[in-house]
């Protein structure tokens, strides 16, 4: 296997390259300094030259609130950029792994969403990630689409790092309690992803750590685990307005993972403990 990983400077791409290297798999991580996803010819030339048999496309415009204003750039990276990668994979016969999000769904009710739930994104970022999925399916038959949620990893910024910082600066924090989902630790996710890459079980999957919580529950657990005395005060989404509307229900069904015989991730509480040790 020869794997090209985009988004190497980000959370997931960085950890995935680390895991592939540990397994002795021939791989290379690239980011915007190697080529800009929005430039079709650059993407095609780079991928043709490196000649991977698999591209793992972690790069994306991930600033959910900024996406509401920077629509053109968000579309260029998440839709056109993904189309460029998918076309290059098609041209050289490579497989493609793409990451999507719980934000492609409207997120009502309290049931877990199956993989074939119709898209109904609330925000622009979610819409572009859904359109990216469409491009992957259009150009590359041998694809994995993995929808993940609430990602945290060693490299880059995320909710846990923000809570650790604010928890040291403040005595009380308000955090939304009416958005329910599952955090995803990139370290754990990468075990699943490398299992997938070593299989031919193509298709769409949902993957996150086991168990559900609200952002306020997650923040409370972070403070407790880190030994911070900062109090987390639960609020509603209405009391904490953001530019992008987020789904209230981000529960993702793992049925397709189970049916394909892939192992689920550990619980988010267990992942959080190990993540704080990793951060040191
Ligand atoms: N983070 C989450 O909570 C979350 C949740 C669900 C799904 N996902 C999806 O999971 C995947 C990985 O997320 P992540 O958290 O690892 O993302 P991340 O940390 O934001 O990393 C994304 C990387 O893509 C790069 N990039 C942006 N525009 C580019 C361009 N035009 N050309 C080349 N590279 C470009 C970024 O570079 P710059 O930093 O220089 O812009 C960054 O290094 C993404 O597809 C994301 O949509 C993430």
Image: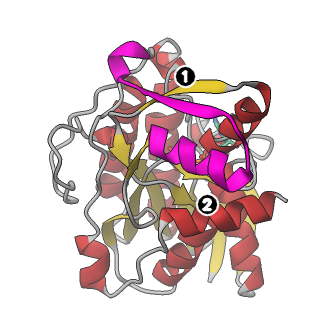
Quarter location, residue 177: top left
Q: Is 243 rendered above or below residue 64?
A: above
Indicate the position of residue 46 as horizontal and vertical percent values. Answer: 70, 54
Q: Is residue 273 magenta?
A: no
Indicate the position of residue 27 as horizontal and vertical percent values. Answer: 72, 73
Residue located at (47% from left, 74% from top): 265
Label 1 near ligand 1 (CB < 8 Å): no
Using a 10 Å C-alpha cutoff, classify the residue at mark 2 as few (fewer than 14 neighbours), some (14 to 19) or many (20 or more).
many
Tell me if I can see residue 159 in this picture. Answer: yes
Tell me if I can see residue 48 in this picture. Answer: no
Query: What color scheme is it?
Result: secondary structure
Give the number of callouts. Answer: 2
Q: Tag 1's secondary structure?
A: helix
Q: Tag 2's secondary structure?
A: helix
Instruction: Compare marks 2 and 1 and give the one earlier in the sequence.
Output: 1
Q: Disc 1 designates what residue?
A: 73
Q: Is 38 rendered above or below residue 268?
A: above
Q: In which quadrant will I find the C terminus?
A: bottom right
Q: Does the magenta stretch include residue 227?
A: yes
Residue located at (69% from left, 62% from top): 275
* 205 relative position to 278: left or right: left
Front-most of residues 57 and 235 = 235
State the mark number for residue 272. Answer: 2
State the mark number for residue 12. Answer: none
Q: Magenta segment, which residues? A: 216-240
Indicate the position of residue 84 as horizontal and vertical percent values. Answer: 51, 45
């Amino acid at each position: 296997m020869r794997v090209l990983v985009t988004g190497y400077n980000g959370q997931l791409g960085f950890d995935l390259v680390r895991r592939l290297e540990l397994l002795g798999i021939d791989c290379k991580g690239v980011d915007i300094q190697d080529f800009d996803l929005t430039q079709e010819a650059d993407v095609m030339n780079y991928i043709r030259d490196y000649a991977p048999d698999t591209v793992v496309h972690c790069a994306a415009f991930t600033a959910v609130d900024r996406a509401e204003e920077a629509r053109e750039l968000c579309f260029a990276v998440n839709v056109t950029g993904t189309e460029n990668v998918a076309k290059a994979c098609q041209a050289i016969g490579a497989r493609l792994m793409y990451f999507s999000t719980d934000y492609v769904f409207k997120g009502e009710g309290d049931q877990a969403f199956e993989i074939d739930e119709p898209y109904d994104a609330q925000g622009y970022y979610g819409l572009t990630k859904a359109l990216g999925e469409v491009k992957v399916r259009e150009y590359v038959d041998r694809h994995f689409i993995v929808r993940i949620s609430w990602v945290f990893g060693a490299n880059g910024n995320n909710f846990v790092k923000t809570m650790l910082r604010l928890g040291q600066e403040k005595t009380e924090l308000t955090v939304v309690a009416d958005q329910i989902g599952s955090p995803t630790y990139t370290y754990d996710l990468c075990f699943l992803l490398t299992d997938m890459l070593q299989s031919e079980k193509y298709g769409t999957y949902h993957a996150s750590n086991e168990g559900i919580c609200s952002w306020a529950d997650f923040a409370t657990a972070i403070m407790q685990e880190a030994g911070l005395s900062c109090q987390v005060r639960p609020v509603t989404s209405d009391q904490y307005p953001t530019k992008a509307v987020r789904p209230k229900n981000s529960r993702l069904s793992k049925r397709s993972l189970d049916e394909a015989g892939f192992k689920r991730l550990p619980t988010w509480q267990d992942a959080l403990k190990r993540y704080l040790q990793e951060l040191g």
